[in-house]
Amino acid sequence: MKKILIIEDHKDICELLKENLELEGFKVQTVSSLTQAFSFFSLSYSIDLIILDLILPDGDGLEILKYVRMSGKYKNVPVIIISARGQELDRILGLELGADDYVVKPFSLRELVLRVKKLFKRMENRSNDLVVAGPFTLDKNKKGIYYKNTLLDLTTTEYKILSLFIENPYKVFEREELLYYIWGNYKEYYSRILDAYICRLRSKLGKAGDYIQTVRGLGYRFVPKESLDN
């Protein structure tokens, strides 16, 4: 069940939103001020989406958006702004600060619920492009590999090798398999080049280079054990 936090001081809007979202199967928590919102975040509650009003009784909702985007726990949580501020500059500022959508009041409840569902669908589709193995994340859409949230500087061939490992942890790849995957055929000098690429990859990964293990007489496998980072 997806969990939604509504930050809205208008009681009627808050209750209507909560009711309509719960009818769609979402679990909804509500707060009505900056103070309550920051208290909620300080308790590290898990949340999947935030619906944020900008005009709150004790300050500007953009302060919450800034906090969320700088937070380790909540920085990737999608945020939909709902606000009576409908000027173009307001919308641009909200989106530039990291909001995923901006809805101007007054709005249709049905439309907002639909936007929530579409945003979750978009996030789900994006998550399918991400493959996680230990501290490594492969972003197939952006064709990048991250180690502990740091983008690795890899050549095309290095990316190809490491992405194959990440998508198939613990699988033993025979040398011929890797050679066909990378270059499309097998030649003896390709085998020596493969060894050089593996060596370079291990060097670039530092201590995590131990994740790439040599299997004697066969080839290589990728064992992403978190214990190697300790």
Image (spheres, rainbow, N blue to C red):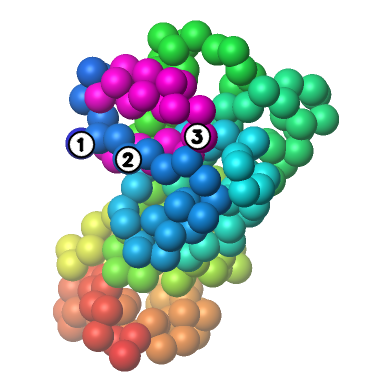
- Work out whether 114 lies above or below 206: above
Q: Is residue 52 magenta?
A: no
Instruction: Give the residue drawn at x 36%, y 43%.
Output: 48
Ranked by sequence position, the earlier of labels 3 and 1 is 1
Image coordinates of residue 21 in percent, x first then y, are 31, 23
Q: Is residue 200 above or below residue 64?
A: below
**Is tag 1's residue or tag 2's residue first in the polypeptide sequence?**
1
Give the residue at x 63% y 27%. 83
Which residue is found at the position 57% from the left and 27% from the top? 82
Question: What secondary structure is marked by label 3?
Answer: loop
Whether residue 5 is in magenta: the answer is yes
Say if residue 154 shows up in the picture.
no
For disc 1, the marked residue is: 1
- Cα distance in 3D space between marks 1 and 2: 13 Å
Residue 23 occupies quadrant:
top left
On-image quarter of the N terminus: top left
Type of amino acid under label 1: Met
